[in-house]
Amino acid sequence: MTRFTLSITATPDDIDELGHVNNAVWVRWIQHIAVAHWEALAPPDQQAAYVWVVTRHEIDYRGNVAAGETVTGETWVPEPPKGARFDRHVRFLGADGKVKVQAVTTWALIDRASGRLLRVRDEIAAPFLSG
């Protein structure tokens, strides 16, 4: 599997009334790192032809992050796709090395032109599974 990492720093707009990153922001960051992973590894013709959509999120919140703190997000696809779908794992580590949030999200491949679900072919999945 190929792990992809991305650093994100919480801004004041990311913070809720409790003084830490809002749960909805974590969902946005999960999507952001997944899309960045796709854009980093998929060739331009695949990016032009396909789009991924989330069909499920399972998120565990394990710690808090305040404005100005940076987390390192990691994402990977541990297993080959099943038809049009695959599970992506994501976790965000604080500066202390502890997991702040971890998630498993299920994504489906959509043909941009038709809007229909597509089976994930081996050549699409391969860059995310090797390494």
Image (spheres, rainbow, N blue to C red):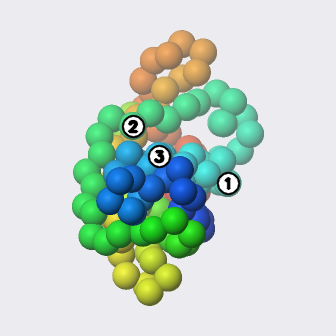
Sequence-wise, the earlier of marks 1 and 3 is: 3
Q: Which residue carries the number 1 mark?
A: 40
> Which element carries disc 1, helix, strand or loop?
helix
Nearer to the camera, 19 or 5? 19
109 with respect to 7 (left or right): left
Task: Using residue 32 as the reference point, say whether residue 22 is left or right of it.
Answer: left
Tell me the crowding category of disc 2: few under 14, some 14 to 19, or many 20 or more residues within 10 angstroms, Cα based: some
Find disc 3 in the rendering and name its residue: 28
**Residue 127, position in %: x, y?**
58, 56
How far is the residue under mark 1 from the one under mark 2? 19 Å
Discs 3, 2 touching: Cβ within 8 Å: no
**Of the residues shown, which amino acid type is indicated by label 3?**
Arg
Q: Are marks 1 and 2 in contact (CB under 8 Å)?
A: no
Please state which amino acid type lies under the numbered disc 1: Ala
Looking at the rendered structure, the secondary structure element under dot 2 is: strand
Q: Residue 19: x and y, percent?
A: 39, 62
